[in-house]
Amino acid sequence: MTDSSSGKILQVGKCELELGGPHLGTLRDSNDIADDPAALHERIAEDGYLLIRGLQKRENVKAGRRVILENLSENGQIDPGHDLDDAVIAEGANGGFLGGSKRVTHTDEFLGVVESPEIIGFFDRYFGEGTRTFDFKWLRAIGTGGTTGFHYDSVYMSRGSARLHTVWTPFADISYEDGPLALMLGSHNLPSYEKIRATYGKMDVDRDNVGGWFSDDPLDVMQQYGGQLGTTEFRMGDVLIFGMFTMHGSIVNQTNRFRLSADTRYQPAADSVDERWVGEKPKAHYAWGGAEQKPMEEARAEWGV
Ligand SMILES: O=C(O)CCC(=O)C(=O)O
């Protein structure tokens, strides 16, 4: 953290938290051990994440960003009064989800990042065996005031490999004000989170039809269960890697620009796979969100967390 960012107040879900204060710190990078799989495994077991700066080729990420912005522009989401590359949001536009069957995540430029030799090679070395990635990709254009509530990815995609990892890839240089991802440090291994991992963490949104976010009030979670939020500013080329039981959400986007990022998944090719996310036309969520979805507060009361 630079001296100028320490003390900054960031909006995270419902709360305002001070960067460098007791509830919000910064993430450390693991570039010094990036070529040492054993050390990376130790680090992710300890920290719950791996931040690798500059893993992707910046020019590849820029090419991906360009097709994403062109797509948003064709859909009237970009203010034409500014350079396309500034990603300024058109009046009334709100971005949204661009992944799944949407065209942009099937372009060579986008796939050239999330399926690049750099990321696949990283996981081949890390797993010590061949890697596969889900065919379904998640790509988000988060608008002004937009944010993601805190959740474990396990609730969305845990029908296959226990070694599934998420990679969060920024398609922009993302400042604190742009609303980067934030991790709940300790949520993967603190004993105080064990009951959350064993109840909420074992939920399956398509089986149980409960809302996916555990909380949009991370301060409340920290006050009950401990841990600390960690975030950082990102540059195109950086990747943030974590497992299914690292709770995460995002800082609120306080700018007039879209915060563009992808989250994609990787696992050993030999492991079983969650059938919802692979194939030419992945089935995706097929029951979640239908009638009679149980609110998270109700489910949490039943689980006692
Ligand atoms: O980018 C975001 O705001 C959410 C991403 C996310 O939930 C994930 O990476 O699993």
Image (spheres, grey):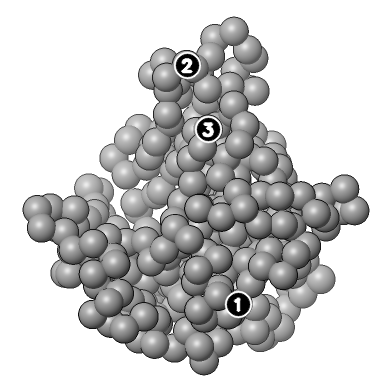
Can the viewer see residue 173 in this picture? yes
Q: Residue at x 59, y 26 (%)?
A: 256
On whether ligand 1 comes within 8 Å of the CB at mark 2, the answer is no
Whether 97 is drawn above or below 70: the answer is below
Kindly identify the amino acid type of the residue bearing the numbered disc 1: Gly
On screen, 303 above or below 31? below
Mark 1 / mark 2, whichever is N-terminal: 2
Q: Does dot 3 land on a helix, a strand or a loop?
A: loop
Q: CA distance from mark 3 to mark 2?
A: 11 Å
Q: Amino acid at mark 2?
A: Glu
Quadrant containing the C terminus is bottom left
Of mark 3 and mark 2, the one earlier in the sequence is 2
The residue at which mark 1 appears reads as 227
What residue is shown with label 2? 91
SS type, badge 2: loop
Q: Taking 235 as reference, is 206 above or below it?
A: below
> Between marks 3 and 1, how big is the CA–CA gap?
28 Å
- Is 175 or 122 nearer to us in this picture? 175
Mark found first going from the N terminus, 3 or 1: 3
Q: Position of residue 111 (x, y in %)?
A: 48, 44
